[in-house]
Image (cartoon, grey):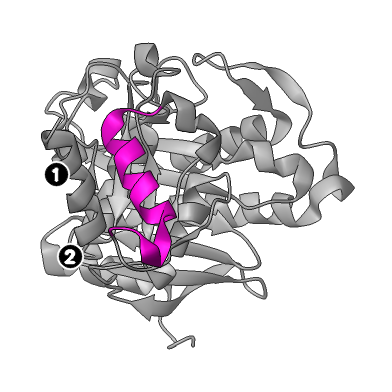
Amino acid sequence: MHNGSSLLEFTQAECTRLGFDDDLAGVIADISSACAAISKLVRHGKLAGNFAAERGTNIQDEAQKELDFLANDILIDHADRGGHLIAVASEEMEESLAFSPHKADEKARGNYLLVFDPLDGSSNIEVNGPVGTIFSVLRAPNGARGLDAEFLQPGTNQLCAGYVLYGTSTEMVVTFGKGIAVFTLDSDDDLFKATDHRLIIDDDTSEYGINASNQRFWEAPVQRYISEILAGKDGPRGRDFNMRWAGAMVADVHRVLSRGGLFTYPIDEKIRAKGGRLRLMYEANPMSMIMEQAGGLASTGYGRIMEIMPSDLHQRVPVILGAKNEVQRLIDYHSAT
């Protein structure tokens, strides 16, 4: 239920409580207004055009849809006009984008960097499935000019992370490193309003999400884990499990946060040369920060995701996150090989 507080009020209070300046609150305000605009596009669907039309490929050689471009442009426009950021980096752009300094008579730009996946799950567009936006805010180094290298910070450096799910309602989940809060977009005034605070997920679960079509490519630890839970109550785990898979990380992670569970996109032989399926900066780090703040774990199977030192803006990694005891079991299986 809506408790009367807005995202802006929450963000300003959190920044004050944690000692952050007004520019960080401004960054989140700019993101929220951009995501409200993206939500309107998603709601209009085919009435607004063919959002599933392909317009090329990104640096990862993946098809880019019309809505990918539109969402990317909207976020950049709001971030630039807000003036709270030095630069942004997007999954849809090969290099980071530095914003021009404001005029001398205007307020200097805030000392922050924003990384984002403007439209997670774009393969769902043509089937009217769930899509979302993922973001992460970093402090810019002293004297930053918006260079790619300035973004290459471990996930432990994140000041704020969050995502927006464009589903049956549009919801934003956000953390400043002291718990997580959930906000729902009110279409009457285009403001995000608090609907849940301080979510904590259970340590145990009987629900998991994985792309089972890749089973033949998985490493031995994942093969072992999945075979045991597929055996159900007659197997070594002694209970039945349910599998859920939405095809968009935002939707799958949101389900874990909402009712517990496990989400994993492990390394496999098909994607080994790329390092994994999901992007460290745009997807894995922000989702890991959120999951840890909800009481879960986030690992590659071989180490904590947020401790990885990035070597490239578009670096990929394996991802295992969710209920603490299930993630730990997978970590133990990886350690045993």
Q: Residue at x 15, y 26 (%)?
A: 309
Amino acid type at circle 2 is Lys
Q: Please rate how many residues cluster around mark 1, counting C-alpha atoms within 10 Å: few if below 14, some from 14 to 19, many from 20.
A: some
Tell me where residue 65 appears, x and y as whole percent: 69, 29
Tag 2 near tag 1, CB within 8 Å: no
Q: Please rate how many residues cluster around mark 2, counting C-alpha atoms within 10 Å: few if below 14, some from 14 to 19, many from 20.
A: few
What SS does tag 1 mark? helix
Q: Considering the image in quadrants, where does the C terminus appear?
A: top left
Which labelled disc corresponds to residue 268? none
Q: Of the residues under marks 2 and 1, which one precedes in the sequence?
A: 2
Which span of residues is magenta-colored? 218-236
- Residue 78 covered by magenta stretch: no
Q: Main secondary structure of the magenta part?
A: helix
Can see residue 178? yes
Q: Is residue 330 left or right of residue 169?
A: left
In the picture of the structure, the residue carrying the numbered disc 1 is 332
Q: Nearer the viewer, residue 85 or 251?
A: 251
Tell me where residue 262 appears, x and y as whole percent: 36, 55
In the picture of the structure, the residue carrying the numbered disc 2 is 178
Real-space Cα distance between discs 2 and 1? Answer: 28 Å
Can see residue 105? no
Residue 149 lies, with reference to residue 267, above or below; the image says: above
Q: Residue at x 85, y 39 (%)?
A: 49
Q: Is residue 154 left or right of residue 225?
A: left
What SS does tag 2 mark? loop
- Residue 233 covered by magenta stretch: yes
Tell me where residue 270 appears, x and y as whole percent: 45, 17
Q: Residue furthest right?
A: 47
Amino acid type at circle 1 is Asp
Q: Residue furthest front?
A: 234
Mark 2 or 1, which is nearer the eye? 1
